[in-house]
Amino acid sequence: MASPVRSVLRSSLAAALAISLVLRPGLAVAQFTPGDSLIRDTEIEDILHRDVAPIFSAAGIDPKGIQIVLVGSKEPNAAAAPGVMMVTTALILESENPNELQGVMAHEVGHLSGGHSFRSGEYARAGTVPMILTMGLGVLAAIAGAGDAAAGLIASAPMFGALGAAGYGREQESRADQAGATLLEKAGLSARGLAEFFDKFRYQEVFAQYRRFKYFIDHPLSSDRIEALQNRVAALPHYNAKDPPEALSEHEIMKAKLDGFINPQVSLGKYDEKDMSYPARYARAIAYYQLKEPDKALKRVDALLAEQPNNPYLWELKGQILFEFGRVEEAEAPQRKSVELKPDGPLLRVNLGQTLIALSSRSKTEEGIAELKKALTQEDDNAVAWRILAEGYDKHGDEGLARLATAEFQYNVGNMRQAREFAIRARERLPKDSPGWRRATDIVLVSKPTPDEVRAIGREGSLASSPAH
């Protein structure tokens, strides 16, 4: 089960996951494109969470319960559902400042608070959209070598599901505009960005549908609608409120980071060597990493670390570069530092766990397993963490736990057949009635077992001891 040493960050960034298409009635509000990739990045997720938290609070929703989902896409798009805010990379890159991004997110929360996703059966019939797949470490998440899983539904996470696609009527769009403006005002934020972002794309109305951004097919613009929105927001007390300097800085960092990973060659021209701002230097370091020039990348990361020694994301990046290019022993220290500086970042722990397991020491493998288990207490549906944990157990000689972790991995990427098969193998190797054995039994029972498998489990009395699903 062991795999060659490789960086989760690099493999994730290099591959576009064929996202499973699923419709979950009741969640809604945008259409995403099949083939878009899911992205995991602690730094960007934290920035987005800070951006949207006051909007959810204004809507009476606890922002601590919100999961940020970042979708790698060329389409500017967003969606809100109970417990979830989904944003595409194109939306971030198209937004000129935090206020514009907050405006679009507020519009989507306006749909949510208005119950638009629940009112019409059309949403359940309209189409399907990508679902959350908790994966990865670093920036993009994709699962290498799991073709069947790419078409599956993650079945067990508390908040992964699909956001349904349907065309909204102009009336509902206008209502969401007004609701979004109200939420921004209530949060003490300007609604100017909401009007300005939509005004920037009003020309989309004149394009044929195949040439428009899909967001503006689902959310049709009109001059009357934009004018009504502009008039409303201009009269609000916080209209002239400015983005705080910290928010502006974070927005530029987020865009530079995405540019560096997604468009490395373009980034080197966009952020040329004359630009000595932090976002520009950050983008260049990432771009050189993506272009497989590790020495240039590390030189730039080290220069940034000299200025910001307590930045966990710079340490994470340094560790990933070292790991990716085979300098695994050197990668351990920066990975440890990233976790030390941000102990509540499960993705950073997964990164460290992967590095430790890749080392030759049995004690390091044990420590890597412990780090992954800590990460999974925070994100128990993190498929990549389960996969690496399986490698760690396999390397450690724990065959039963290795197969159980593989079953968890398959379960969390929606491959029920493989999940069931590995869970059955795990049960054969784990002590009967141990916690792992019972968990393996649960996976068998919820992963479409055959009648014979159910009867076999029933005969041994496991059904009586297994919790209901």
Image: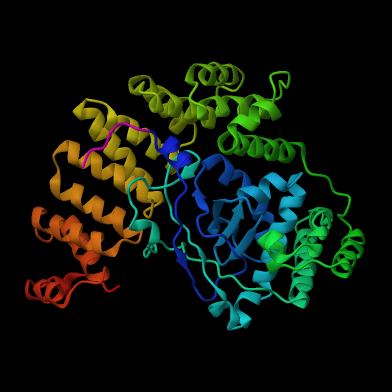
Q: Nearer the viewer, residue 203 or 120?
A: 203
Find residue 323 and report its horizontal and vertical position in percent: 39, 27
Residue at 50% of width from left, 51% of height from top?
Answer: 38
> Picture quarter containing residue 385?
top left
Range of residues picked out in magenta? 1-6
The image quadrant where one finds the N terminus is top left
The image quadrant where one finds the C terminus is bottom left
Find residue 66 and report its horizontal and vertical position in percent: 55, 58
Q: Is residue 370 visible?
A: yes
Q: Main secondary structure of the magenta part?
A: loop
- Above-or-below relation of 89 to 361: below
For residue 416, side relative to residue 440 (left or right): right
Q: Is residue 58 visible?
A: no
- Above-or-below relation of 200 to 306: below
Residue at 61% of width from left, 48% of height from top?
Answer: 89
Residue at 44% of width from left, 61% of height from top?
Answer: 20
- Above-or-below relation of 394 to 408: above
**Residue 229 included in the magenta stretch of the image:** no
Find residue 49 and report its horizontal and vertical position in percent: 61, 50
For residue 388, side relative to residue 139 (left or right): left
Find residue 423 and report its horizontal and vertical position in percent: 19, 59
